[in-house]
Image (cartoon, grey):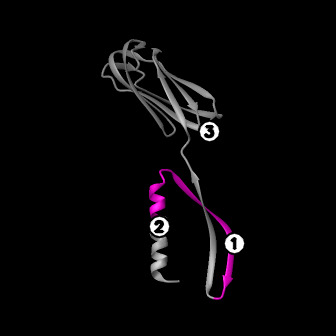
Amino acid sequence: MDKRIILKEAVTVFLVMIMIPSTLSVANTGTKTSTSDVETKELWLEYTSEPQIFITIKGGLGVSADIKNIGTTDLTNINWTITLDGKLIFLGKTKNGTIPSLAVGEMATVKDFVIGFGKTGINVTAGPAVGNTTGTVILFFVFGVK
């Protein structure tokens, strides 16, 4: 096989892998054929996207977040974190946990009890998804979550 053709194919595969914004996994079919000096092996590229999670952040008694699976596959072991960055947050600056399973279309609510005063940024992560907003904390109530 001509070296220019091999180089062109390698560059094409490299560019395709860079342009796809998710993970590529390679599955070997194990098929080998041999004809004279040429040996070929079939490979399949399988496109796998990140889990699709939608986060809704709410105030009230502390901070809560509804985490919904809007993808097409059931999810398991979803790590989540709620973080408040206000300077006068005395309790509940960070809380994390794991949602054991979340079926397609299902929603789980996670909560963080907060004590503090003043404006704060609120950051919620669940798996690869991130949600950010702001609110105002007065004792253990969180108001004005946008």
**How far from the left and from the top, in percent, is residue 134?**
37, 22
Task: Point out the tag, 3 or 1, that comes first from the N-terminus.
Answer: 1
Q: Which of marks 3 and 1 is in front?
A: 1
Q: Residues within 10 Å of mark 2 (few under 14, many from 20)?
A: few
Residue farthest toward the left in the current orientation of the protein: 87
Q: What stretch is highlighted in magenta?
A: 14-36
Left of 130 or right of it: where is 30? Answer: right
Q: In this view, does 44 lie above or below 31?
A: above
Q: In which quarter of the image is the C terminus?
A: top left
Mark 3, Cα crowd under 10 Å, few <14 / some 14-19 / many 20+, is some
Q: Residue at x 35, y 20 (%)?
A: 89
Q: How crowded is mark 1: few (under 14 residues within 10 Å), some or many (20 or more)?
A: few
Answer with left or right where residue 145 lies relative to residue 106: left
Type of the residue with mark 3: Leu
The residue tagged 1 is 31
Res 61 seen here: no
Badge 3 is on which residue? 75
Q: In this view, does 13 lie to the left or right of 88?
A: right
Measure how far apart labels 3 and 2 are at the Cα level. 33 Å
Whether residue 55 appears in magenta in the rendering, the answer is: no
The amino acid pointed to by label 1 is Thr
- Indicate the quadrant where residue 69 lies: top right
92 left or right of 25?
left
The one nearer the camera, 55 or 110, is 55
